[in-house]
């Protein structure tokens, strides 16, 4: 359901109910005020008319009430014209006449002067005495009431010189006339309420449009942003809050666009990095692991170990030179630069790389002399079976069968140098498993390296080359 419909359904019945209630209250108030107004006017008319007729003229009218020529007498005409003028000024009057109340005990009164309307009774005619007229005669006070024939009836006394009631002024107004006025007022109220209702409907519709149209524009703009159309901006004309919301959505769209572009760039960089890392792994296997695995010598065995890495790192290259079977030179090169740049340096200028050179020369049968030359911060370690100790290699150290050498990259070397517990772990592996063979010992050393990478959150790979002096056959 649209907001315009919701507002109309919410406000329109409530407002119409309020208008109808107010109209009913106003009608009841007007009815009471209108009836009170006509009662006061009618009472004022009869009292004013009673003050115009003095006792002398009343006696004259009473004396000649039986005379047929009374209606042509100047006094009669004078008072009759007065009554007619009063009726013209007050068109709501149904009748206005003067009565003599001398025969009150007989239950009748005698009409002396009428307003000369065609439907009024002739002068001198006797008419029944009403209850209100009797009350006015007895109380000497004017009275107004609603009679049985559905008229508003007022009576005022005429006094003589002795302040005695000698006659009555009577006037009445038909209630149909008053109801006609009420109906006219009711129509005015109804038309006013209807006009007010139409104005309210138009106002609510305008307000709903001013609210719903900007919201509709915001919704369409949000859908446009969701579809990926970042260039189109949301333009909304409306209240300050709606304009600020549109500006916020535009800012959000710009931020989302920037974030998505960054994500795309990061995804591309990540794919490139992953591809680069995979290529580096393949090249390292060729330059390091494969060289070690393809090496064969009757007295010396090699084994390369390396942990995995998800980041670009410094690469290792293994170069072996053999002089018959009595002298071997192992060169372990570590690139200064990371990634493909380091690999490229292996192919072009090896002088820029870190170098650790180990020379093994057979001096006697089953005895080898080990010397080294390093351009890095790392040193070779060696394990001697006789001493059962793993320690840094010294120049011109004698090695015997079942002794081993450990050449590491700078990352692993720094850990062995700084962490005594790590050094003990490696020493314990050589002490317990060197007799099990090079493959088994190197597997356990690799497990220790994997444990170190997880424990210390190392991003660089831990790499090492194990050189074992074989047993004599």
Image (tube, grey):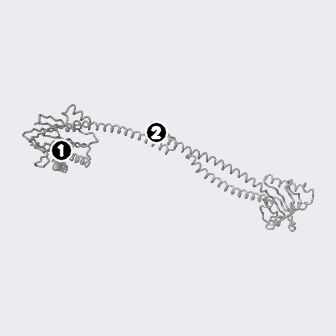
How many other residues sit within 10 Å of disc 2, few (<14), some (14-19) or many (≥20)? few
Q: Is the Cβ of the residue at disc 2 closer than 8 Å to that at disc 1? A: no
Looking at the image, residue 451 sits to the left or right of residue 470; the answer is right
Q: Residue at x 26, y 35 (%)?
A: 340
Residue 150 numbered tag? none
Q: Does dot 2 land on a helix, a strand or a loop?
A: loop
Residue occupying the far top of the picture: 348
According to the image, label 2 marks what residue?
A: 227
142 or 446, nearer to the observer: 446
Location of the C terminus (image quadrant): top left
Residue 108 lies in quadrant = bottom right
Instruction: Residue at 67%, 49% (x, y): give it.
Output: 192
**Considering only order in the chain, which callout, 1 or 2, is on the residue closer to the N terminus?**
2
Tell me if 79 is positioned left or right of 428 in this view: right
- Where does residue 101 sit, x and y in percent of width and height? 85, 64
Residue under label 1, please give it: 438
Q: Position of residue 14 (x, y in %)?
A: 60, 53
Extreme residue toward the left, this view: 364
Query: Where 390 sits versus 335, above or below?
Result: below
Q: Position of residue 448 (x, y in %)?
A: 22, 48
Please give the name of the residue rendered at 37% of the width and 40% of the height, measured from the top-left corner: 263
């Amino acid at each position: 359901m649209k907001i315009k419909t919701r507002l109309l359904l919410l406000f329109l019945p409530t407002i119409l109910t309020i208008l109808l209630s107010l109209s009913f209250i106003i009608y009841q108030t007007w009815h009471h005020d209108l009836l009170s107004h006509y009662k006061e006017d009618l009472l004022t008319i009869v009292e004013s008319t009673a003050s115009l007729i003095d006792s002398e003229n009343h006696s004259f009218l009473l004396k000649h009430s039986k005379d047929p020529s009374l209606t042509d007498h100047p006094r009669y005409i004078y008072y009759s014209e007065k009554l007619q003028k009063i009726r013209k000024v007050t068109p709501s009057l149904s009748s206005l006449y003067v009565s003599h109340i001398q025969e009150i005990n007989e239950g009748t009164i005698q009409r002396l002067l009428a307003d000369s309307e065609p439907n009024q009774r002739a002068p001198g005619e006797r008419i029944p005495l009403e209850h209100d007229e009797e009350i006015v005669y007895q109380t000497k006070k004017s009275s107004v009431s609603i009679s049985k024939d559905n008229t508003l009836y007022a009576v005022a006394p005429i006094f003589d010189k002795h302040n005695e009631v000698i006659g009555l002024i009577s006037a009445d107004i038909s209630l149909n006339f008053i109801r006609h006025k009420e109906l006219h007022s009711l129509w005015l109220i109804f038309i006013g309420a209807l006009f007010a209702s139409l104005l309210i409907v138009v106002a609510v519709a305008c307000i709903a449009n001013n609210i719903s149209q900007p919201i509709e524009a915001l919704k369409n703009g949000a859908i446009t942003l969701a579809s990926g159309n970042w260039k189109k901006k949301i333009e909304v004309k409306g209240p300050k809050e709606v304009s600020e919301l549109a500006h916020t959505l535009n800012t959000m769209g710009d931020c989302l666009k920037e974030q998505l572009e960054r994500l795309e760039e990061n995804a591309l960089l990540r794919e490139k990095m992953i591809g680069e890392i995979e290529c580096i792994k393949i090249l390292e296997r060729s330059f390091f692991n494969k060289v070690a695995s393809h090496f064969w010598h009757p007295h010396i065995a090699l084994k390369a170990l390396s942990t995995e890495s998800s980041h670009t790192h410094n690469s290792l290259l293994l170069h072996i030179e053999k002089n018959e079977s009595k002298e071997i030179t192992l060169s372990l090169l570590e690139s200064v630069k990371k990634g493909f740049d380091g690999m490229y340096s292996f192919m072009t200028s090896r002088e820029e790389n870190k170098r650790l050179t180990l020379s093994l020369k057979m001096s006697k049968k089953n005895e080898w002399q080990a010397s080294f030359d390093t351009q890095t911060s790392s040193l070779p370690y060696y394990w001697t079976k006789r001493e059962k100790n793993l320690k840094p290699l010294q120049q011109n150290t004698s090695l015997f069968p079942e002794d081993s050498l450990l050449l590491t990259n700078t990352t692993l070397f720094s850990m062995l140098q700084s962490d005594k517990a790590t050094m003990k772990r490696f020493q314990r592996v050589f002490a317990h498993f060197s007799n099990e063979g090079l493959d088994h010992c190197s597997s356990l050393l690799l497990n220790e390296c994997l444990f170190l990478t997880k424990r210390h959150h190392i991003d660089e790979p831990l790499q090492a080359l194990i050189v074992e002096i074989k047993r004599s056959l």
